[in-house]
Image: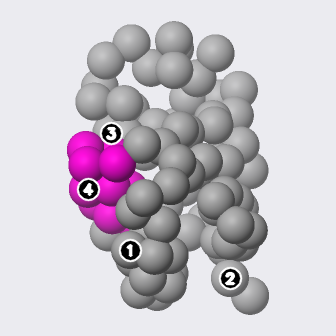
Amino acid sequence: MSAITYNENKALFEGNVFEDEVLALRAFLQSKTKEQLSFDLTSCQDMHTAIVQQLLAFKTAYDCEFIYGDKTKTYAMALEGFCEVSEAVA
């Protein structure tokens, strides 16, 4: 079962997202470059660094939003640039 569910312009991440998800994620991102995407990470426990890299590459070039859960995760700090993550998570 996939840890990422894709629905139009939204990707829902659940549980632990491993590196075997990176090709499907990249295909999704490449097909949506002209649209604003939403990444729902509220149910994500952890993700492989290859997934973080794909999201960071997309974030630097295209419009997107990240929806975080209540607890600060290491991947969230990386995605937000190690700034005040508490503001991004809140």
Real-space Cα separation, disc 4 to disc 1, in angstroms: 11 Å
**Residue 2 got which mark?**
2
- Residue, x 66% and y 57% (percent of image)? 10
Front residue (pair 70, 61):
61
Indicate which disc, 4 or 1, sits on the residue closer to the N terminus. Answer: 1
Could you tell me how far apart the alpha carbons at marks 2 and 1 are, in whole angstroms?
19 Å
Disc 3: which residue: 78
Q: Amino acid at mark 1?
A: Gln
Task: Indicate the amino acid at tag 4.
Answer: Ala
Question: In the picture, which quadrant includes the N terminus?
Answer: bottom right
The disc label shown at residue 57, or none: 4
Residue range corresponding to the magenta coloring: 51-62
Query: Is 69 in the magenta?
Result: no
Classify mark 2: helix, strand or loop. Answer: loop
Cα separation between marks 2 and 4: 22 Å
Q: Tell me the quadrant of the picture where the C terminus can be found.
A: top right
Q: Check disc 2 and give the amino acid type.
A: Ser
**Residue 16 percent across, percent down from the top left:** 61, 65
**30 is higher (above) or lower (below) than 10:** below
Q: Which residue is mark 1?
A: 30
Judge left or right: residue 46 versus residue 30. Answer: right
Q: Is residue 13 visible?
A: no
